[in-house]
Amino acid sequence: MRDRPVLVTGAAGFIGFHTVRRLLDAGRRVVGVDTLTPYYDPALKRARLAALPASDALRIVALDLADRAATADLFARERFAGVIHLAAQPGVRHSLVDPHAYVDSNLQGFINVLEGCRHGGCGHLLYASSSSVYGANTRLPFRTTDTVDHPLSLYAASKKANELMAHSYSHLFGLPTTGLRFFTVYGPWGRPDMAVWLFTEAILAGRPIRLFNGGAMRRDFTYVDDVVEAVVRLLDHPAAPDPDWSGEIPDAARSRAPWRVYNIGNNRPVALLDLVRTLEAALGREVLREDLPMQPGDAPETYADIDDLARAVGFRPDTPIAEGIGRFVDWYRGYRGL
């Protein structure tokens, strides 16, 4: 099956771009799909695509996955060996403003991908979930065996819905599906709506950074290269049924169907104020602060238990925050010509 291409949706996005590049380095043929939505400046997405290597093994397709007929046609033509579905409407706070965008992309788009995999003979579907599915959970670290039934935002609810939709297809049609609960991914070519980019931009411009909850939050910041390494390893590790799974004592991370979810995190939460100090050191600038209240939909802390990921593929994300921030700052200065 390795002679068939791998589909990466959201190929012009942050994680998608890095994933495409990593697959090409591994000698895989890749079809990348993106529609360059304007949630943030599409110029950054175009720059990512331009930075991908010219290769006969890569084809980029402009396609809105919410378009049922066009998506079905793509899957019928290509017969993908595997699908890494990263396209989505992101952002917890934006889901309070434009909820319909999350239904169109994260639900309608996802069902079209599931149908494409079902009818197209796909060997394994990996899809982006999120640490936000843990919602109101407060027991730390977050474990995939925990129930996740109390989302704090529509974004989180859409990602939980993806996990449920995937399970139904795994159960009904034997489609191996793996959910990837990403924890605060950062690094070069990152998203400009996330803290590392926003803080860096503000510090270099001499503007105050906005610290929600007065900065009294902790996040499991995870470097993008570690995320992509986990994803690519999991691609060749399709979810399998667990014959020991019990409906009497159901394990929320696995199933009798070929369905799994994994946390993809650094397993090392960082206080937001420590992140700020790390950026100050990397940029050689002092920070101006604007303290703001906690935002609706935010969680005070995220912390990933990744033992099941390590057991499955022998890998644990481990890039220290100072090293990852240094790489991001070097990239950001180059990208901005500073």
Image (spheres, rainbow, N blue to C red):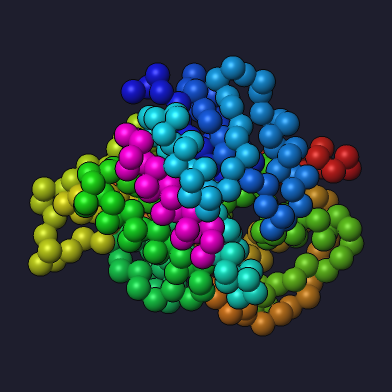
Left or right, 319 with respect to 251, comes to: right
Instruction: Give the residue displayed 46% in from the left and 65% down from the top.
Output: 158
Instruction: Give the residue displayed 74% in from the left and 48% down from the top.
Output: 42
Numbered disc total: 0
Q: In the picture shown, does residue 288 fall above or below 117?
A: below
Q: In the picture shown, does residue 182 fall above or below 137?
A: above
Residue 110 highlighted magenta (yes or no): yes
Residue range of the region highlighted in magenta in the rendering: 103-128
Q: Which residue of the protein is positioned furthest toward the front in this rendering? A: 69
Left or right, 99 with respect to 28, comes to: right
Q: Quadrant of the C terminus?
A: top right
Q: In the picture shown, does residue 21 fall above or below 261?
A: above
Left or right, 49 with respect to 286, comes to: left
Percent position of residue 324, x then y: 63, 44
Percent position of residue 93, x then y: 62, 71
Percent position of residue 70, x then y: 52, 43
Residue 238 highlighted magenta (yes or no): no
Left or right, 52 with respect to 333, comes to: left
Q: Quadrant of the N terminus?
A: top left
Nearer-the-camera pick, 185 or 48: 48
Instruction: Give the residue displayed 81% in from the left and 56% down from the top.
Output: 201
Instruction: Give the residue displayed 56% in from the left and 35% down from the top.
Output: 32
* Quarter of image, res 59: top right
Q: Which residue of the protein is positioned furthest toward the bottom in this rendering? A: 293
Camera sees residue 183: no
Nearer-the-camera pick, 46 or 226: 46
Percent position of residue 17, x then y: 61, 38
Camera sees residue 166: yes
Secondary structure mainly formed by the magenta segment:
helix
